Image (tube, rainbow, N blue to C red):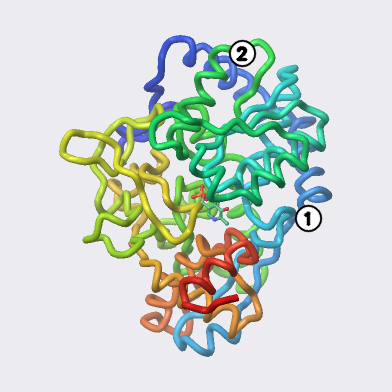
Amino acid sequence: MTVTTNMFYGEFGGQYVPKQVKDALTEVATAYERYRQDPDFLAELQGLLADYSGRQTPLYYAESLSNYLGGAKVYLKREDLNHLGAHKLNNVLGQILLAKRMGKKRIIAETGAGQHGVATAAAAARFGLECEIFMGELDCQRQKLNVFRMTLLGAKVHPVKTGTRTLKDAVDAAFADFAANLADTFYIVGSAVGPYPYPKMVKDFQSVISKEARAQILAKEGRLPTAVIACVGGGSNAIGSFAEFIDDQAVRLIGAEAAGKGVDTPDNAATMTNGRVGISDGMKTYVLMDDDDQVLPAYSISAGLDYPGVGPEHAFLKDAKRAEYYAVTDAEAVAAFQLLSKTEGIIPALESSHALAQAIKMVPQLGKDDLVIVTVSGRGDKDVNQVAAYLGIDL
Ligand SMILES: *Cc1c(COP(=O)(O)O)cnc(C)c1O
């Protein structure tokens, strides 16, 4: 493998941002490198993860699903059982503690569907910090309930009216605000994306998933899994699920990205399958682009996966052939959503359903001695209306 540094993963990553933003990032990186080793910081984070978010999350043997599929034993890493119903809080709690240590009074974040905005607003409420969320105006209209949730949690939501009025424009607005208000403001990025140090920092905070899962599978089975499968939007739950297994060369690391209506249609978010190397959101990575290198809008039934880029470490792991990435369609994800609900009594998020769909394809081909861990990144209560509509059921 090519050498990775703090800032780069092979050719990917970096800091492709204006000078003022670079200064802001340097301050964050310096503080992070200091506190990531600090026992008091780590103990406080550990306490919040336990008592506020409810960790550790179970590694659950899905016996009924395993019997149904025939083949490997399937274990589910239950990130859906975190406070707020997803893995996002793992990262938000880490970054907000850092903000507090740095003496920042004001928290900002970008959000697409609103999940990261809600997690950030909740944590800011918990710490009594001012919180402002940037969200594309179109996304605000599509996700009114999450806008109200953020307001309820005491955050101010700024509808971003530029460009396509979606996530990318919200990211730009948040970085501009960050550079302008560095003295009192901390920007909590929502996935393992963007300029250094965010991909590294978000990975560290999400690595709690694989730290727990690795110990749990060893305790239950006395051996490592054959494969770990997670869905990839920006890639934070996936890199957190992979992290502690990367050096275990025998463990297959598998990412499921969103093929939307199909990788051969314009409506997909299959960055690894269809993307080219480019620069977007301050990093070099795989990006969905047109022939003029303009970033294309992404589409998936699952709002958390419709991102046209991907975290730089995933781009690196793909090229290094250490991880494998497969595209899963809306139809396959909805079928997995229904199957897990029926076999295990667990309604998974549509995002997580992409990882489950990939498991459903692979598990029957594996042997009885194989173990597969699938990360259930979130719960599906937020998605039931959409699935009903997809299935043509009028509620
Ligand atoms: C936001 C979200 C994702 C996608 O984000 P990653 O950074 O790729 O993990 C996946 N699952 C759920 C439940 C989410 O809320």
Q: Say which of 72 and 333 sits in front.
A: 333
Q: Nearer the viewer, residue 191 or 370?
A: 191
Above or below for 11 versus 225: above
Q: Nearer the viewer, residue 367 or 80?
A: 80
* Residue 132: mark in rendering: none
| Label whose residue precedes the other's in the sequence (2 or 1) | 1
Above or below, 118 relative to 377: above
Under circle 2, the secondary element is: loop
Marks 2/1: CA distance?
33 Å
Does 249 sit left or right of 35 as displayed? left
Amino acid at the residue labelled 1? Gly
Horizontal and vertical percent for residue 309? 37, 42
Report x, y in % for residue 38. Answer: 72, 28
Location of residue 354 by image quarter? bottom left
Specify whether 296 is left or right of 136: left
Mark 2 vs mark 1: give the one in front: 2
Dot 2 corresponds to which residue? Answer: 181
In the image, residue 206 above or below residue 11: below
> Residue at horizontal 45%, vertical 36%?
165
Residue that mark 1 sits on:
54
Position of residue 242 in the picture relative to residue 264 (left or right) = right
- Residue drawn at x 52%, y 63% is 352
Question: What is the secondary structure assignment of the residue under circle 1?
Answer: loop
Question: Where the C terminus falls, by quadrant?
Answer: bottom right
Q: Residue at x 64, y 59 (%)?
A: 79
Give the x, y percent position of residue 161: 48, 30
